[in-house]
Image: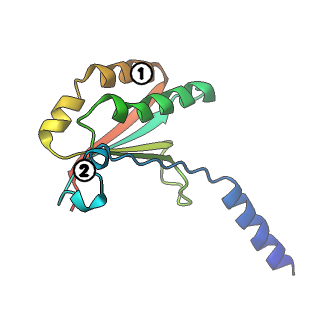
Amino acid sequence: MARNTLYLTVLAVLLGGCVFVHETKRVDDEKAGSYAAQPEQVLRHVVLFRFKEGTDPADIRKIENAFRALPSKIDAIYDFEWGTDVSVENKQKGFTHCFFVSFLSEADRAIYIPHPEHQAFGALLGPHLDDALVIDYWAK
């Protein structure tokens, strides 16, 4: 009986602490009109953020909203999704936010990186950012 109570308590704590947000927007779907037109591969731009200790949650929300707005402002973005850490392995090293920005080509990524909207986002993020990890790869 005590074992079941302990198990349920631990499970409730783990599940209660999980936060997950997911948003996907395929800019190309609006143009193609269906998922049948999906490309063979996409270039994934993976971005992880660790915010400075004491960053106000309202500032984090502004940053999330600003990043989420980029696909509507930069046509080179093919796909976008993001979420916050829900891992139970405790290996995230303080990184709490993950963003996937997908492109159809290296040329599209080359448009995105210096784009004024992306640069403005970086200026908003900068004062609150402790560290970032960025990895690009071709999804197979």
Quadrant the C terminus occupies: bottom left
Circle 1 or circle 2, nearest the eye: 2
In the image, farthest residue toward the right? 1
Q: Position of residue 93 (x, y in %)?
A: 48, 46
Viewer-proximal residue, 47 or 109?
109
Identify the image quadrant of the N terminus: bottom right
Q: Amino acid at mark 1?
A: Gly
Q: Nearer the viewer, residue 25 or 93?
A: 25
Question: From mark 1 to mark 2, how far is it between C-alphas?
Answer: 36 Å
Residue 86: x and y in percent read 55, 54
Mark 2, Cα crowd under 10 Å, few <14 / some 14-19 / many 20+, is: few
| Quarter of the figure with residue 10 | bottom right
Question: Can see residue 99?
Answer: yes
Point out residue 77 in the picture as x, y percentages from the top left corner.
Answer: 27, 39
Q: Taking 106 as reference, is 57 above or below it? A: above
* Mark 1 or 2, nearer chain start: 2
Reading the image, the residue beneath label 2 is 32
**In the visual, does 17 lie left or right of 89?**
right
Q: Residue at left 23%, top 29%?
A: 113
Q: Point out which mark residue 126 bears.
A: 1
| Residue at the spot 81% in from the left edge and 78% down from the top edge | 3
- Amino acid residing under circle 2: Ala
**Can you say whether 86 is above or below 50 in the image?**
below
Q: Is residue 51 left or right of residue 69?
A: right
**Residue 6, x across and y down, in percent:** 80, 71
